[in-house]
Every structure is written in structure tokens, then in C-alpha cells.
Image (tube, helix red, strand yellow):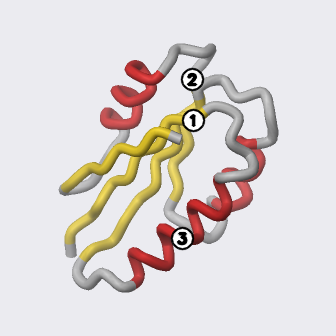
Amino acid sequence: MKLLSIVFSFRNEEGNIEPLVKRISTTMQKIENWKYELIFVNDDSTDNSENILDKLQENYPIKIINMSRNFGVDPCVLAGFKNCSGDAIIYLHM
């Protein structure tokens, strides 16, 4: 079985995280021979995003990377890639 790593960089996306995770999970269940991991790189959010991810982590294969300050997209992408375990990577910016 292959592993797909899906990396997201985000900042203050509390309203979008849960629907996104559920849509991806539904889609990945239909794909044979692939498991997945979701890697969320938090670019110093000031909203409830991290708490939402913590709760979702109980039921979904989620890794959370919290940046120490707002770095912007490029460092977040690299942090996500460095923490992937997959055979293939998809990056999506939120």
C-alpha cells in the first residue's frame, strides 16, 4: 500500500479546516491501494485553528507543525515536505 502526503500551509483558517479534512477523507476512501496523511503547517495562527486540528487528530491521520512565528508560505512548504512520510506529496495552500 502506498502513502500519499497532503501538505497544507495555513494561517487563521478555523472555518475551513474541518470541512476540508472531511472532504479529503471521503475522497481518499474511494482510492484503492493508497493511504494518506494530512500535514498542516500552522503559520502562527491567532484563531482556533490549532484546537480544531487537535480534535480532528483523534479520528484522522493528521500531523500538525506549528511555526514559531509568521514565516510566510515558502518556509511552511519546506517544513511540511520535511515532515512527510509519503511515497508522493501534494501541496495545497489554504
Amino acid at circle 3: Arg
From the viewer's perspective, is the residue at label 1 or at label 2 nearer? 1
Mark 2 lies on a secondary structure that is loop
Who comes first in sequence, dot 1 or dot 3?
1
Amino acid at circle 2: Met
* Spatial separation of the CA atoms under disc 1 and disc 2: 10 Å
Task: Please state, as top left, top right, bottom left or bottom right, where the N terminus lies in the image.
Answer: bottom left
Tell which of 46 and 57 is nearer to you: 46
Would you name the residue on which mark 3 appears? 23
Would you name the residue on which mark 2 appears? 67
Mark 3 lies on a secondary structure that is helix
Left or right of residue 40, residue 1 in this image: left
Residue located 47% across and 43% down the image: 8
Who comes first in sequence, dot 1 or dot 2?
1
Q: Which mark is residue 10?
A: 1
* Spatial separation of the CA atoms under disc 1 and disc 3: 17 Å
